[in-house]
Image (cartoon, helix red, strand yellow):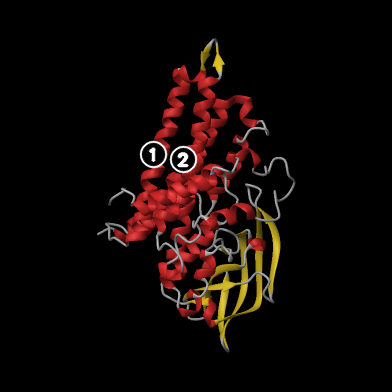
Amino acid sequence: MDFTFTEEQQAAVEAAGAVLSGVAPDGVPSPALVPGAVADDIDRALWRRLAAAGLLSLPVPVEYGGAGLGPVALCLVLREAGKVLARVPLLETGAAALALQRFGGAGTDRLLPVIAGGDLVVTVAAHGRTGHDGAELAVTARPVTGGLRLDGLQTAVPWARSADRILLPARTDGGRTVLALVPPDRSGVTLADQVSTSGEPYAQAALESVHVGEGDVVTAEGAWEWLRRLLATGTCALALGLGEAVLRMTGEYTAKREQFGHPLATFQAVAVQAADRYIDLRAMEATLWQAAWRMESGAEGALPAAADVAVAKIWAAEGVRRVVQTAQHLHGGFGADTDYALHRYHAWAKQLELSLGPAAAHEEALGNLLANCAP
């Protein structure tokens, strides 16, 4: 395990920082101020800037106009995006691109150059019917002439109305899981509006006799399991970036806010709480890069890569919650002021904590992995 980043990965961080520096968290639409969804669309202007900087092409192979980088580079960029609450499907589109280049065939490969140029927005349906059952169980796939017929329901699909394709798992009659690329405006697809905890527009996608051609289906064994682990790892990267931004805000506030003639940061109780949250962030960081490294390298370990992803998600879910709660406490009433960005971070943190399973769900998954690997 080597956590030293390559020159290409470091360049990606610098490019992301330059583009995302123009995003003001204070200007991110607030779920506390807007009834329903905070906006109808993703931040298209930011999406175009990311595409122009080559950041959307990072996970796309060189032969398709990309940089050919992997999960670590994607997570590095997502970490920067989490710091500013970037309202773009970087995680979903990047993870889809990596899954397509790793598992897709000649049919799906045609989409990679379009993703690299920022002209194809892809989201992923990963929550199943209720968010509790496996997403691969929510949609059935039956063979028809020239492709598959899909029937079922997927809930909480991020930015579904803004996407050009929804990548979703489906279960065949033989019990195999395939991935299908479905345009949200395809006949038989019905979207019902939903709103995430962070106020972003999600949708419930109902599919009734939806036809997808063979060129829009990934049939490789293990593709869905790998994609779901990558989505969970990327969620950890977003949580880490968010937590780092919140702790920085808290440090700056307590350094200048005075009580009894002294800055709050000089009081031991404040310093100890901030130090505890710093430890949380370092644990989140170490477990994130362990998981991302396992995903990228395919290296063997005492436990499968799924265990490292579970550990990272446990720390991310618990850690980001503790960071924002401590920040609210140390900010006092000012932290709830809707003119200040902290309440926005709090809403996004809760969404990330629960997305793709809270800590308890991953603790159970880790326990099962440990039990199955026991001699």
State the CA–CA distance, disc 1 to disc 2. Answer: 10 Å
Q: Nearer the viewer, residue 90 or 68?
A: 68
Question: What is the residue that sits farthest to the bottom in this orientation?
Answer: 145
Q: Closer to the N terminus: mark 1 or mark 2?
A: 1
Nearer to us of marks 1 and 2 is: 1
Which label sits on residue 319?
Answer: 2
Kindly tell me whether residue 215 is visible in this rendering.
yes
Which label sits on residue 282?
Answer: 1
Q: Is residue 365 left or right of residue 128?
A: left
Q: Residue 161's image quarter?
A: bottom right
Q: Position of residue 343 (x, y in %)?
A: 62, 36
39 in relation to 181, above or below:
above
Question: What is the residue that sits farthest to the right in this orientation?
Answer: 35
251 in relation to 324, above or below:
above
Residue count near mark 2 (Cα–Cα under 10 Å), binned few <14, some 14–19, many ≥20: many
Tell me, yes or no, whether the two marked residues, 1 and 2, touch with CB atoms within 8 Å: no
Residue depicted at 49% across the width and 33% down the height: 247
- Please count the marks in the image: 2
Q: Residue 69's image quarter?
A: bottom left
Question: What is the residue that sits farthest to the top in this orientation?
Answer: 261
Residue count near mark 1 (Cα–Cα under 10 Å), binned few <14, some 14–19, many ≥20: some
Q: Is residue 128 left or right of residue 76?
A: right
SS of the residue under disc 1: helix
Q: Nearer the viewer, residue 263 or 61?
A: 61
Three-letter code, disc 1: Arg
200 in relation to 270, above or below:
below
Q: Position of residue 352 (x, y in %)?
A: 54, 48
Three-letter code, disc 2: Gly
Residue depicted at 56% across the width and 61% down the height: 127
257 in relation to 213, above or below:
above
Q: Is residue 201 left or right of residue 142?
A: right
Q: Position of residue 193 (x, y in %)?
A: 71, 59
